[in-house]
């Protein structure tokens, strides 16, 4: 059965309004995998419906316990990696900040920038070309 694209747009709107039956949802998922649905106006619908379908399968009470444990493990690993990345970045930023006295004032900045500024101060010789 072939429908116009406007039918699928309406069905997608009804899906997001929670007004579709299970059969209509299955039909919409099948359409989103078809060649006709490769139109850019269905990109967000395809992504959202796919995500919700995977979440529903992974977290449903009748899903295999091993699958639920695997999803939980993957989420724990992802959270751990995010925390480790943040702490590493924070530690790097804390270790790379220094304070020095430049031209009589205390300046806090990245160590390499401070080194460049001090080197410029040290080798900045007055111009005596007017003598």
Image (tube, helix red, strand yellow):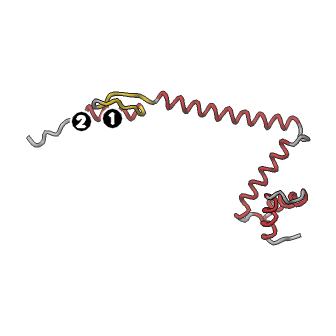
Q: Which element carries disc 2, helix, strand or loop?
A: loop
Q: Alpha-carbon neighbours of circle 1 within 10 Å: few (<14), some, or many (≥20)? A: few
Residue 75: mark: none
x%, y% of residue 38?
74, 63
x%, y% of residue 108?
40, 31
At x 83%, y 42%, the residue is 58
The image quadrant where one finds the C terminus is top left
For mark 1, what is the residue? 117
x%, y% of residue 60?
87, 43
Q: Nearer the viewer, residue 86 or 67?
A: 86
N-terminal of the pair, mark 2 or mark 1, is 1
On the picture, is 81 further left or further right than 73?
left
For mark 2, what is the residue? 124
At x 34%, y 35%, the residue is 116
- State whether residue 89 is above or below residue 10: above
How far apart are the alpha carbons under marks 2 and 1?
10 Å
Q: Quadrant of residue 73?
A: top right
- State whether residue 62 is above or below residue 115: below
Q: Which element carries disc 1, helix, strand or loop?
A: helix
């Amino acid at each position: 059965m072939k429908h116009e694209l406007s039918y699928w747009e309406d069905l997608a709107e009804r899906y997001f309004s929670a007004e579709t039956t299970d059969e209509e949802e299955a039909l919409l998922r099948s359409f989103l995998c078809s060649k006709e649905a490769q139109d850019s106006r269905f990109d967000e619908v395809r992504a959202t419906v796919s995500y919700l379908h995977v979440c529903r399968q992974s977290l449903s009470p009748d899903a295999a316990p091993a699958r639920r444990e695997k999803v939980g493990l993957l989420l724990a690993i992802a959270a751990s990696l995010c925390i480790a990345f943040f702490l590493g970045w924070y530690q790097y930023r804390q270790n790379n900040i220094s304070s020095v006295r430049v031209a009589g004032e205390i300046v806090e900045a990245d160590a390499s920038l401070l080194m460049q500024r001090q080197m410029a101060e040290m080798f900045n010789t007055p111009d005596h070309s007017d003598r």
